[in-house]
Image: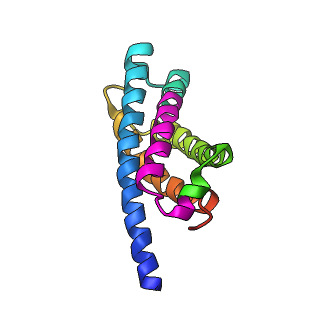
Amino acid sequence: MKNRNLKRTLFEFLRYAIVGGFSALVDMGVLWAVTEFLFDGQNTGIPLAISVAAGFAIGLLVNYLLSMLFVFTTGEQKQKSRGIFAFLTYAAVGLIGLGLTEGLMHFGMLFVSTEGLWYLVLNLFVKGVVLIWNYLGRKIFVYHGK
């Protein structure tokens, strides 16, 4: 039984990683579009923070909807994911992820060039770190470990 639960959790995480990857592409697309078109390529300071937050908001919504459809699919999980409290908890975990993203992006920009698209490469690395937090946080706080 334990082996079965581990296998189910691993497949669930794999589905979450795929959904997270797609959501990350949406997030990064918004990050790029806002940075390049709204802030004329300025990728530091307040413009970067706004661009990251805009990408986060759209990516969060995409992730929530796709996770309900493809990741957390057991009857109990579907029940726990419905309603405003579940979404707010889901978003709260995401906001912590946003804080991690903002902090790691600003820290990482100390080490990468501000010229070109290096901020996107850095963002990809940061997303890998935050993916683990988001999965575990949502699994524990939204779905109560189920």
Q: Position of residue 111 (x, y in %)?
A: 42, 39
Residue at 47% from the left image edge and 84% from the top image edge:
2
Residue at 32% from the left image edge and 30% from the top image edge:
117
Frontmost residue, 54 versus 41? 54
Name which quarter of the figure residue 12 lies in: bottom left
Q: Can residue 65 be seen in this view?
A: yes
Frontmost residue, 18 versus 48? 18
Q: Which residue lies furthest to the bottom in this view?
A: 1
Residue at 42% from the left image edge and 28% from the top image edge:
31
The residues colored magenta run 53-77
Question: Left or right: 46 with respect to 89?
Answer: left
Q: Identify whether 75 is placed above or below 91.
A: below
Q: Residue furthest right?
A: 85
Q: Identify whether 26 is placed above or below 79.
A: above
Q: Is residue 39 visible?
A: no
Q: Where is residue 145 in the image (x, y as percent from the top left)?
A: 58, 67
Q: What secondary structure characterizes most of the magenta part?
A: helix
Frontmost residue, 117 versus 111? 117
Question: Left or right: 47 with respect to 92?
Answer: left
Residue at 44% from the left image edge and 24% from the top image edge:
43
Q: Can you say which quadrant of the picture contains the C terminus?
A: bottom right
Frontmost residue, 124 versus 56? 56
